[in-house]
Image (cartoon, helix red, strand yellow):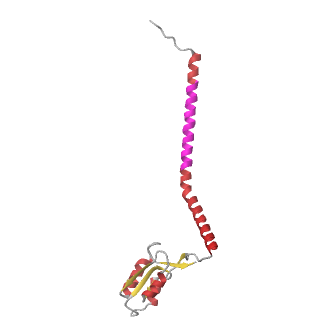
Amino acid sequence: MTTTQPPSSAASAAPLSELQELVALVSRLSTATTEVMRLSVEVQARLPLVVGIEVAGARAAALAQAAAAAEVDTDPVFKRQIAQTPADLERTHPPGSGETWYVVIRGREPGMYQSAKDANEQCNGVPFQHMAKKTSRVEALSYYRDHYNLPAGEGVEKWVEV
């Protein structure tokens, strides 16, 4: 029969200290991993904004440089302004002033026009232009009023060249 002797205190101290060192390293690794994940999320959150600003700036600079080099007119640039209210249209277009109306919802000057030519002049070249033909003043005013308070991109928008 063989008997095992309990390990000496010197022999058991060495593995215990190695174990403590490994636990400490794993703890440091866990902390570092957590910090890396936090920083990764922060970078991902900021990246689209920074890249978008840089890309827009670079694009504008390239367009300006190309236009200057070619000395040609670039496409017109538009910005939004305040359009006429439905009440303004009722005052400027009294009852009995025509039966066919062209309602411009998004264009240079949104409103009601009695000729397709006039309405087209308000829409040509404007981004996201929108025009509709109506058969009566009441129907045209109703259509304009319905679109007047819709959110940007869906409702009445006045665009002017800058």
Q: Which residue is found at the position 51% from the left and 11% from the top?
A: 5
Give the percent coordinates (x, y) of residue 63: 59, 69
Residue sitting at the far bottom? 96
Q: Is residue 90 left or right of residue 56?
A: left
Rendered view: 150 above or below 120: above
Residue sitting at the far top? 1
Give the percent coordinates (x, y) of residue 27: 55, 35
Do we see residue 18 in this rendering? Answer: yes
Residues shaded magenta: 17-40
Image quarter of residue 90: bottom left
Give the percent coordinates (x, y) of residue 148: 44, 78
Image quarter of residue 100: bottom left
Do we see residue 84 in this rendering? Answer: no
Q: Is residue 129 magenta?
A: no
Q: Is residue 38 magenta?
A: yes
Q: Which residue is found at the position 56% from the left and 56% from the top?
A: 47
Q: Is residue 84 left or right of residue 51?
A: left
Between 132 and 30, the one nearer to me in the picture: 132
Between 7 and 125, the one nearer to me in the picture: 125
Quadrant, the C terminus:
bottom right
Q: Is residue 136 left or right of residue 92?
A: left
Quadrant, the N terminus:
top left
